[in-house]
Image (cartoon, grey):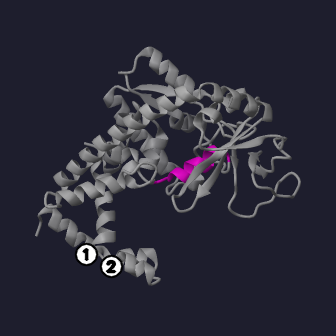
Amino acid sequence: MRSKLGGRVAQAAEIALGTRRYVTAIDVLTGLRWLHGRHVDAWRQGRVDSLERLAAVDEARMAEAVAHLGEWAAERGLLPSETAYRAASRDGRPLRFTAAGDDELERRFRVHWVSPELSESRRRQLAERLDRAPDLVVVAPLEPWTCAGCGGAGPYLIMEDDRPHCLTCADMDHLHLLPAGNAALSRRAKKESGLSAVVVRYNRRRKRYERLGVLVEEGALALAEERCLADEEVRLRRRERDRERREGQDAEFRERMAAEIVRLFPRCPAGRAAAIAEHAAERGSGRVGRTAAARALDEGAVTLAVVASVRHLDTEYDALLMSGVPRMTARDRIRPRVEEVLAAWRGRP
């Protein structure tokens, strides 16, 4: 009999396993909502000394969740594979999960649990990909900042020795920004460039870091442009095929999500269920329907999509926000109405 936390860990792990065929401690910590994706991004960039600093719980609670993950993985017959975690900074230093950095506990956090259904060659490829040194990450900051090297600033910063540096002090000011938007050009320019870095900026509305482009050497960019021009027609045809495939996958997922909404809320009008699924699952929206949990049709994630729809369309929530009521206060006020609608859709008195 699993404890309450053990059950929540198992649920988060099942979603990750069904999505990627392997599970990590980070999958569980984010699945438990003890960490947000933006916290993990900042940690991977080397901007904090440990993931624990950003978590909603302490080391002991994190360790308890990882212990439950190990028990669940053993029951499922998953294979352990220890993975190196390195910062996306110039020093590429090892990342710590906990503030204390106990070696044995850190090792448990680094273990990835892999499905035995993967072939040996696929497992080897996966291990090589996960152990590969991460791309350097340069941040376009939203707030004023000071370079630890020269005392100046600049449009971008990169972490070195746990401190922010401008590109001049980091010897990267000779690189050129290739804006995001052309995947083939970015991929080729990065491959040809001896030194490169991904540029990101934090989107406050979506609460995540978004890619602005890649910094590459001028000669590498020129060579990549020549090669892209040479096979542009082939890539256009491939892009169209990929677009059609994605549209088919999205349509199929929306249908399955709408059906799951009707299963959970039998009295929800079919048209409304379809509208909720279409809105929540819009590609690139960052909404709940695009999360791994929703893609696995997790009951909690699907219910969150329904709650969001009811909140905006069946209550005075938006009007309260427009009148200046704080968001959490507005949610408290409309909660009884949301619960009333959900109960009616479930067919409960």
Percent coordinates x, y for residue 175 in the rendering: 79, 40
- For this rendering, which residue is in front, 290 or 107? 290
- For this rendering, which residue is in front, 203 or 17? 203
View extreme (bottom): residue:
323
Residue drawn at point x = 34 percent, y = 48 percent? 294
Mark 1 or 2, closer to the camera: 2
Residue drawn at point x = 30 percent, y = 53 percent? 277
- In magenta, the rendered stretch is 34-46
Sort mark 1 into few (<14), some (14-19) or many (20+) by Cα contacts within 10 Å: some
Residue at which label 2 appears: 316
Percent coordinates x, y for residue 323 in the rendering: 44, 84
Question: Residue 293 lies in magenta, yes or no?
Answer: no
Q: Describe the element under mark 1 as helix, strand or loop.
A: helix
Which numbered dot is residue 327?
none
Percent coordinates x, y for residue 338 in the rendering: 26, 71
- For this rendering, which residue is in front, 291 or 116? 291
The reply to whether residue 14 is in sight is yes
Which is nearer the N-term, disc 1 or disc 2? 2
Q: CA distance from mark 1 to mark 2?
A: 9 Å
Q: Describe the element under mark 2 as helix, strand or loop.
A: loop
119 relative to 344 in the view: left or right: right
**Callout 1–callout 2 Cβ contact below 8 Å:** yes
Residue at which label 1 appears: 337
Query: What amino acid is found at the position of numbered circle 2 in the picture?
Result: Glu
In the displayed structure, 308 sits above or below 137; it is below
Which quarter of the figure is the N terminus placed in?
A: top left
Percent coordinates x, y for residue 114 in the rendering: 42, 27
In the displayed structure, 38 sits above or below 122; it is below
Query: What amino acid is found at the position of numbered circle 1 in the picture?
Result: Arg
